[in-house]
Image (spheres, helix red, strand yellow):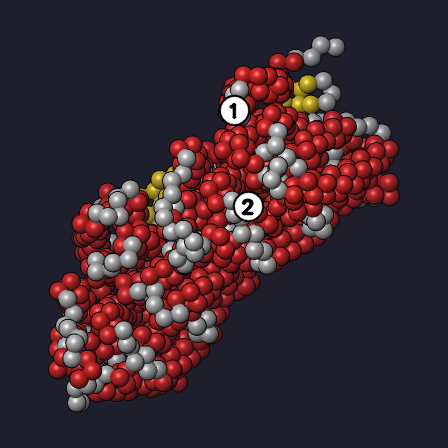
Amino acid sequence: MTHNYGLLAPEFILFGFAMLVVAVDTFRSQFKVGSAVLAATAGVGALAALGASVAMAGVHEEFGEILVVDEFTTFFRILFAATVVVVIAMSHEFVGKHIRHPGEFYSLLLLSTIGATFMAAARELLTAYIAIEVLSFSLYVAVSLAKTDPRSGEAGLKYVLLGGVASAMLLYGLSLLYGSGGSTSYEVLREAFAEQAGEASALTLVGLAMVIGGLAFKASAVPFHMWTPDAYEGAPLPITAYLSATSKAATFALLLRLLSGPLEPLIEDWRWMLATLSVATMVVGNLVALQQHNIKRLLAYSSIGQVGFMLMALVALSDQSTSALLLHLSGYLITNLAVFTAVIAFYNRTGREEIEDFRGLAETQPYLAVVITAGLFSLSGMPLLAGFATKFLLFQAAASGGYLWLSGLAVVMSTISLYYYLQVVKQMYFFEPSGDASRWRLTPSGYVLTAVLLVVMVIVGLYFGPLYEVADTAAGALFA
Amino acid sequence: MTASDGYVLLALVLIPIGTSVLLMFTPSKERGAVIGITGLSSLAMFVLSVYAFAMYDFEGEQFQGMLTIPWVSNVGLLGEKGIQLKLGLDGMAATLVLLTGIITMAGTWVSWKLTHRMKDYFILLYLVAGGVYGTWVMLDVFFFFLLYETAVLPMYLLIGVWGSTRKEYGATKLMMMLVGASILIFVGIFGAFSAAGLGTFDMEELFRAGETGLIPRNTQILLFPMVAVGCGTLAGMWPFHSWSPDGHASAPTSVSMLHAGVLMKSGAWGVIRLGFQMLPQGAEYWAPALMVIGITAALYGAISALRQTDLKLMTGFSSVSHMGYVFVGLGTLNVIGMSGAVLQMFAHGVMTALFFLLIGGMYDQSHNREIPNFSGMAKQMPIWTIFFVIAGLASLGLPGMSGFIAEVHIFIGVFRAYPVVGGLAVLTAAITATYLLRMFSQAFFGEFNPRWSHLREINYRERAGATVLAITILTMGIWPAPWIDRVANAVAQTIPGVSM
C-alpha cells in the first residue's frame, strides 16, 4: 500500500528543522554565535510549516488508517504552526537570559507541535496516544529548562510524575475501549458502540471514564488540574505560554475527534461526566484564581477556568457548538499569547512576576500596560476585544443546545474572573511605581509582536465573520 | 429622515471611537492638539445629534435612517440574518441621541482643565460616548450589547485614575456591580435567542417574535426580570443602586456628567429595548412589580437625599429617586406614562449633568462638598448660583422647566393606572422640593462664610457648558412639543401592548 507522504509535509518540515536546530546548536560554540541563530532557524522552520499548512488548506485525504488531513486537521495545523511562530518570536530575549539549553528549547517546541497536530489528525486510538506522548514528553523536558529558577526542576518532576499517571490511565482506558469495540480505528469503534448505545457494557463505561479522566488531566480540568499551577509557575515563561495555548487546544482537538466520532453513540453516558467536569472546572479555576499573588499562577488558574467554558461546548456537542468552540479557542490563543508576550517583556526587564510588581506600569511603560489590560479584559470577555465575541457565541451555542443553566453559570464565573484581572489592572493604573519610576523602552520585536497580536485581538473581537466561517468549515468536517 | 441618514447614525458611533483611536497616536505633551481634536469631535457629534433629532419625522416610519450591513450570516448557529450591523432611529432614541450630543460636548469643555494625563482621559471618555451612542442606534442585539458593555468598561479606569474620595472602592464597586448585572442580561439574551429559534440577533425580528409569542409567554415571564434587573442596575434601580452614589462621589466631573446624564439612561433604555420591546408579554406580567420598585426607589432616593450633607452624594441619591420615576412611568403601560419615562430620561440627564458640572467647578477650588460648610455663596459666586438654582428648580419639577414636562406625564399616567402610587409619586416630588430648597437656603443664602472668599466664579468653559445645558432645560420646559411628539409616537407604535 502506498501512502501520500506529501500530506504530512508541514510535519516533515517541522521535524527537519527541529533536527537542524540541534545540529546547529552542536557547532554553535565553535563558531561563537549566540542563540539568535537557533531562534532564526526554528523561526524559519515554523514559518515554512505555517506556509505549507496554509497552502494545503482544502485538502481532504486520509493517510493510511491512522491519520486524516481534513478541514479540521488543517484548522488546528495552522493554529499550532502560528502559535509556535509567535512563541519563538516572543522567546528570543528570554532564552538568552534564562534558558540553559537553547537548542533543546527550540527543537522541542517544533517537535511538540508535530504531536499536537497529530492529536487533531489521528483517526485511530494508538496514533492518538502516541501523538499525546510526543507532545507531553517534549513539554516535560521543556518545563525544566530554566537555568536560574529552582522551581523549574520541581515543576518538571511534578509534571512528569502526574502526567505519567494520567497517561497510564488514558492508555488503560483506550485498551478497554479496544477490548469492548474490537478495533482501534475510530470508524469501526463508532459502529461497535452504536450497537451498544443506551446499554453500554461495563467494560465500555470504565474505558470511557478512564479516557475522559486521562484527557481531562491533559486539558487540566478540575479535579485533574493539580499539576497546572506548579508547572505554569515553574516553567520558563514562553513554555508556560505554550502550555496554555497549544497543549490545551490539542487536547480539545483530540476530544472533539473522539466525542464526535467513536464515542458519539455513547453521548448520554459521557455527557454528564463532562458537564460535571465543566462545572467543577469553571467554579474551582475562577474562585481559586482570586487568591493568587503571582501572575503565572493567576494565569494558570484563569486558564483552568477557561477550560471549564470550553468543556461546556462539548457537553452541548453539535456542529454549532463545535464551530463556536473552535472560534473561541482561536480567540483565546491569540489573547493568551498577547498577554504572555507582554508579561515576558516585563519579566525580561524587571525579573519579577508578582502581581504587586506591576505597580505603576502605566507610568513606566504605558504601552505594555495597555497590552496587558486589553489582554486581560479580553480573557474576561469584555467588548471590542476577541473575548467578548467568541465567548458570546460560545455561551449562546451552549444555551441553544439546551444548556442555558450552564451558560448562565459560565457568565457568572466569567464575571468573577474580571475581578481578579482587575487586580492586575489596578496595580498598573491606580498606583505610582514603587521603585524606579523612569520610563523604559520595549525591544522592537516586543513592540511589533504585541502590536500585531493586539490588532488581531480587536479584529477577531469585531469582525469575526471570516474566522467563524473557517471554524464552521472545520467543524463541518467532523459532523459530515 | 432619508435612508442615507443611516450613515449619520453610523458616524455618531464611529466619530467618538475614532477620536479615541486618533488620540492614542497623539503625543500626550501636545495639549493643544488634544483640545483641538476633542473640541472638533464633540462639536461634530453635537451637530449630527441635533441633525438626527431635527430630521426625525415623527409621523413617518417607526424606524428611520435604517442602515443594514450584513456582518456574519449562515455560519454556526447564525442563520440568514445572523449578526448585522443594523442601525436605525426611533423617536425615543432620537431624543436620547440629542441628550448624548449635548452632554458630551459640555463634558468635553469642562475636562480641558485636567492636568493629569488629559489625553488618556479623553480616550476613555470618548469610548463611553461611542458605546452609549451605539446603544441608542443599534438594532442588532449583539452590537447593542457589545456597545452597552463598551460604555461601562472605561468607567473603571476613569474613576480609579482620575477620581477623588475613596476612588478605588468606588471604581471597583461600580465595575463589579455593573458587570455582575450584565450576567442577567447575557442570560436573557441567550434565552430569548434560543427560544425564538430564528438564528438572528436582528432586533426587529426578535421584537416580532416577542409580540407574536414565538418566544413563549412563560419564557418571557422568566426572562423579563433578568433583563430588567440586569439593565436596571445600570439605571440605578433600587435596590441595585448602591454603586451609584459611591461611584458618583468618586468620579471626576465630566465622568459624573456622562455617567449620570447618559450612561444610566442606557440602562433604562435596555429595559425598554430588551424588556418591553423584545419580551412584551413578560413586561406586561411584571409591570406592576416594576411600578412598586420604581416608587420605592423614588421615595427611598428622596428620603436618603434628605439626609446627605455631601453635595455629590445628595445628587447621587437624587438620581436614584429620579430614575425611580422612570420605572414608575414604564410600569404604567400606557402611552402617556411611558412617554413620561423617556422624557424623564432626557430631562434628568440634562439637569443632573448640570448639577455635576457645577459641583465639580466649585469642588476643584474648594476641595469641599459639605453643604453645612457653605453659606451665602450667592454673594461670592452669583453666576454659579443662578445655574445651580435652574438645575434645582428643574429637578423639583417647576413648570417651565424640563423636569415638569416629564413628571407631569408620569403623574398623569400613573394616576390613570394606579392612583395610590400616583399619590406617593407626588409625595416624592414634595420631598425633593424639601431637600433642594433647604440646600439652597443653607448654601446659597444667609451670611457669607469668609472662609470661601478665595473662591472664584466658574471659568468661561464651565459657563459655556452650563449655558448649553440650562438652555436645553428651559427650551424643553417652554416648548416641549418636539420631544413629546417624537417620544409619544414611538411609544405608541413600537411598544406592544401599551394602552392609550
Numbered mark located on residue A288 in the image: none
| Chain letter belonging to callout 1 | A
Determine the CA span between mark 1 and mark 2.
45 Å
Residue lying farthest to the top in this orientation: A2
Amino acid, disc 1? Gly
Q: Residue at x 39, y 66 (%)?
A: B167
On the rendered structure, is A187 left or right of A95?
right
- Please determine whether, in this image, residue A289 is positioned above or below residue A319: below
Q: Is residue B49 visible?
A: yes
Residue linked to disc 2: A394
Which quadrant, please, contains the N terminus of chain A?
Answer: top right
Q: Which sits in the foreground, B44 or B315?
A: B315
Using the rendered view, name the quadrant where residue A257 is placed.
Answer: top right
Q: Secondary structure at mark 2?
A: helix
Residue bearing the label numbered 1: A34
Q: Position of residue A137 (x, y in %)?
A: 71, 32
The chain to which mark 2 is attached is A
